[in-house]
Amino acid sequence: MLKSIAEDLRNCLPLETMLSSEHLALQKIQQQPEPTVHVDAFLYDEDSIDSLCEEGKMSRNYCVVCGSYQTAPLGFISHSFSLMELKFIYHHVLPDLSGKLLVDVGSRLGTVLYGGYLYSSALQLYGVELNGDFCQLQEMIIKKYQFTDRIKVLHADICTQDSLLQNADVIIMNNVFEYFLDEAEQARAWECISHNVRKQGSLLVTVPSLEESLSGLQVSIQLSSWVEEVPLNYDVYPEKDINREALEQIHLYKIL
């Protein structure tokens, strides 16, 4: 079913899965130290990328000196979890979610919500998304696949959702602010999260780590008195073709 959802979304979006309304994110990707392209990991797995490269629709390399044979690998960035990462989160990172409220901050295409619907028993799955275009896409999928009983999408700034954050049992944040907000707005958003996500024992899943997300920002957040990191076992999939590096970006924290 998730593969069918991915196909529906691919048909609605350009190959790079970035919308023209995402000015700041597009600009930040262009400013990366090495040429970087956005490839959505939920929509395009490694086999899909290989096929697109063979068809000449995508490349894994860029030309160092235009017109020469000196090429180097392109950097890839995704703002969605892959199928494997979703399975890892719901089967190996999070406990049983029966009766629990999960919030995905910056739900984008809704992948965390669909994964939570199919891979967990979470009572309610809320996506909070600032971009109206992505909210419409999520609503389309939720209606088509009849997920409306457990999934709700809010077109809102997370800083307006104090009550939702205070009541959440699980909060998921994947690359959520860095590409979409300037540094002052990032700091404001993190202050808001740390102020409201205080329910003892609730869980926070982040990519990258909180330390990495907060480094370089002007915030007064004391991680040691707010959260405790829970060690994860990244060796649950012994297969050789697993992207372990991507799994190692996933961090779990318990609210103290």
Image (cartoon, grey):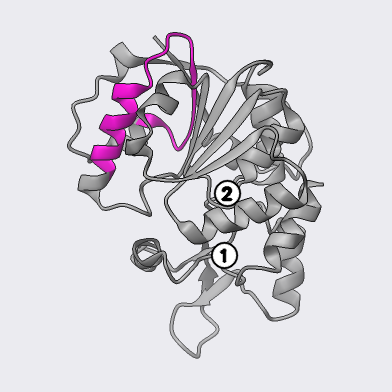
Crowding at mark 1 (Cα within 10 Å: few <14, some 14-19, many 20+) = some
In the rendered structure, the answer to whether residue 209 lies left or right of residue 196 reads right
Q: Nearer the viewer, residue 245 or 195?
A: 195
Question: Disc 1, disc 2: CB below 8 Å?
Answer: yes
Q: Is residue 77 visible?
A: no
Q: Quadrant of residue 241?
A: top right
Residue located at (76% from left, 34% from top):
118
Indicate left or right for 145 with 75 as reference: right
The residue at which mark 2 appears reads as 80
- Amino acid residing under circle 1: Thr
Q: Position of residue 209 (x, y in %)?
A: 42, 32
Q: Position of residue 208 (x, y in %)?
A: 45, 38
Q: Is residue 187 magenta?
A: yes
Q: Residue at (43%, 83%) from the top-left corner?
A: 65
The region drawn magenta spans 186-210
Residue 86 located within the stretch drawn in magenta: no
Q: CA distance from mark 1 to mark 2?
A: 10 Å
Task: Give the residue furthest to the bottom.
Answer: 67
Q: Tell me if I can see residue 24 in this picture.
A: yes
Q: Which residue corresponds to mark 1?
A: 17
Q: Residues within 10 Å of mark 2 (few under 14, many from 20)?
A: many
Looking at the picture, which amino acid does disc 2 mark? Ser
Side of 85 relative to 70 (left or right): right
